[in-house]
Image (cartoon, helix red, strand yellow):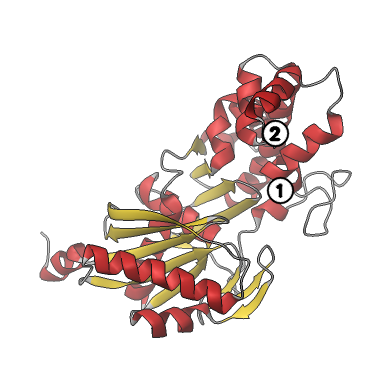
Amino acid sequence: METNSDMKKNKEQFLGLDCGGTNIKIALVDSEGEILKSAIEPISYKQSPQKVLKNITSCVQHFMDKNCTSKIKGLGIGVAAEVDQKNGIILNATNLGWRNVPIADFFTKELGIPINVENDSHCAAWGSYCLDAKKKCSTLICLTLGTGVGGGIIIGGKLYRGPNGLAGYIGHMSISYSGRVCRCGSIGCLESMVGAWALSQTVKERCSKNSFPILRKLLRIDKQFKITPELIAEAAINGDCDCQKLWNETGKYLGIALGSLANIFNPEKIILCGGISKAGVLFLKPMLDTFKKQVFKTIFQYTEVSISKYTDKIGVVGAALLFMDVIYER
């Protein structure tokens, strides 16, 4: 029987904010994870942190005013950075050059509502747990496959942050010590082998007048001359053997990583999300074949590996619902 407390909780609304590299996603989300309203706003990070945060505040305020979000309980923010979640501080955002930015205090003063700040991959993991898994498992691992590779770990139905809030940097587990130097400075990180920037770099290293024929044709037609996972996938689907080989290798690298993660955590579910996951048809089989070889047989039988059905929204939904989870923990 639904109690008055449950009914009140179910009527509550939360804002989610997913800060991407070129735009921000804003969504009004209910306690069940349903998006009631959403918007995407372009954003530039070339200015000072204070100016960028002021611009983001304006976008959020306009969204709140436009949608009359009077029932809103607070705002959950996902950002690609090392985050002190308890104090709402961006400790280090490498791509932005930000260090020790008190983002929660800034938004609280500007918007007048409670704020929760999380690493964006943590938000995606929680969104995947709520939307893909429907919270019907205890242990889940989520890999975000985009420009880089992030991750999040759910243990006992709770996001595992670690003592400093920095757990889940799955993209920086080394899977090949003879591999490429990663942007973090380490060698053979998963991110340096399967991230979007890594795929582009591999094509550049291998490209010659006799290689990647269909991809090179697509690049000329596209006239951007920018190698993207989308173009590599399109070329592979259209028969480019070099691109097909690259996706096959990507699957094997992922399989190695998943095997190690499964042997350590024994998760019920492993879910992949992010832009590169949309090319799953090209790397899923080699990934699962390699995963099966890497992991203990019993663990393999009880671990479900899948690609998220909600890639385009789990970050912003996860940010909103993680805020709700934090609030009800207090």
Tag 1: residue type?
Answer: Glu
Report x, y in % for residue 277: 55, 37
Closest to the observer: 312 or 296?
A: 312
Q: The residue tagged with tag 1: helix, strand or loop?
A: helix
Report x, y in % for residue 148: 66, 50
Q: Is residue 248 left or right of residue 112?
A: right
Real-space CA distance between mark 2 and mark 1, rounded to the nearest whole angstrom: 11 Å
Q: The residue tagged with tag 2: helix, strand or loop?
A: helix
> Which residue carries the number 2 mark?
250
Q: Is residue 7 above or below residue 202?
A: below
Q: Quadrant of residue 133?
A: top left
Label 2 crowding class (10 Å Cα cut-off): few <14, some 14-19, many 20+? many
Tag 2: residue type?
Answer: Thr
Q: Is residue 152 left or right of residue 128?
A: right
Q: Is residue 307 left or right of residue 97?
A: left
The residue shown at (32%, 64%) is: 63
Q: Which mark is residue 284?
A: none
Closest to the observer: 272 or 53?
A: 53
The answer to whether residue 288 shows anywhere in this view is no
Closest to the observer: 201 or 56?
A: 56
Which label's residue is closer to the chain start, 2 or 1?
1
Q: Is residue 289 above or below residue 46?
A: above
Q: Which mark is residue 191?
A: 1
Report x, y in % for residue 16: 38, 62
Q: Is residue 123 above or below residue 266?
A: below
Question: Which residue, as the protein is rendered here, is positioned at the far front?
Answer: 223
Report x, y in % for residue 96: 65, 66
Question: Which residue, as the protein is rendered here, is positioned at the far right?
Answer: 178
